[in-house]
Image (cartoon, rainbow, N blue to C red):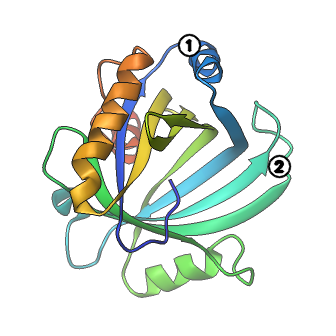
Amino acid sequence: MNSNDLNSIEVELKFRVEEPAAMLEQLVNLGAIEGPIERHQDTYFRHPCRDFAQTREALRIRRVNLTTDPAGQGAAKGEARITYKGPHLVGPVKARRELEWQLDPSDPQGDQLQQLFELLGFGPVATVTKLRRTMNLSYGDRQLTVAIDDVELVGRYVEVEVLAKGEDDVPVARKAVTNLAMTLGLVTPEPRSYLSLLLIASGQ
């Protein structure tokens, strides 16, 4: 979920799904509007001085190709974004500060930024590749996003997300995410990140 607001906190739950088409149908019936279909290549980096796995932070370059093809072919537009995700806040639903912004057109695929990271000692860990279909809807008094992801080597997942407006808003945002997940019949959250799941799947 994109944000350049320094006070924004991403609140989300992720679930494995077997029938994405059925989930899409439920969301449409709830009035959700589909956004662009995106193919993501998310390259994650390790910090030269601290262990992000221990601090539960993340730093990545996301390379995005937009397409209207549900199979993810025929990309119409590309861009790159940088994302930093902070440590998880205490609580039953994942919540963490997120900063994300689009890179300048002079570095449309983030190659220059990746070179800079590597020169500074931020080594690449792995690249998570996925096809994402995003559905946006009003639920209660919140605007939520449901992302349906087909992740290479990992599987199919649904992420239910909302942005909290600072830490005071996190409990309400957590309740909104939990309620929508229950409405969609999603009951067993997957706490691990796509990066963690990919590393397990590839034996790293």
Which residue is at the front of the view, 110 or 169?
169
Three-letter code for the amino acid on which mark 1 is drawn: Glu
In this rendering, position of residue 160 left or right of residue 69: left
- Please say if 145 is above or below 17: below
- Can residue 27 be seen by looking at this rendering? yes
Residue 89 rendering spot, x and y as whole percentages = 18, 55
Which residue is identified by label 2?
75
Residue 154 in sight in this render: no
Give the image location of residue 97, x and y in percent. 32, 63
Can you tell which quarter of the image residue 53 is in? Answer: bottom left
User: Which residue lies most toward the left here?
Assistant: 90
* In front: label 2 or label 1: 1
Q: Amino acid at mark 2?
A: Ala
User: Which residue is the site of mark 1?
Assistant: 19
Q: Residue at x 38, y 74 (%)?
A: 6
In three-dimensional space, the C-alpha distance between marks 2 and 1, rounded to whole angstroms, equals: 25 Å
For the residue pair 182 and 155, the one nearer the viewer reads as 182
Q: Is residue 32 above or below residue 40?
A: above
Mark 1 is surrounded, within 10 Å at the Cα level, by few (under 14), some (14 to 19) or many (20 or more) other residues, namely few
Q: Position of residue 24 (x, y in %)?
A: 62, 21
* Snapshot quadrant of residue 137: top right
Q: Is residue 159 above or below residue 180?
A: below
Asked whether 28 or 20 is in front, the reply is 28
Left or right: where does residue 44 sit relative to residue 101?
left
| Quarter that holds the C terminus | top left
The residue under the point 71% across, 65% down is 79
The tag earlier along the polypeptide, 2 or 1, is 1
Where is residue 134 shown, x and y percent of the image? 62, 39
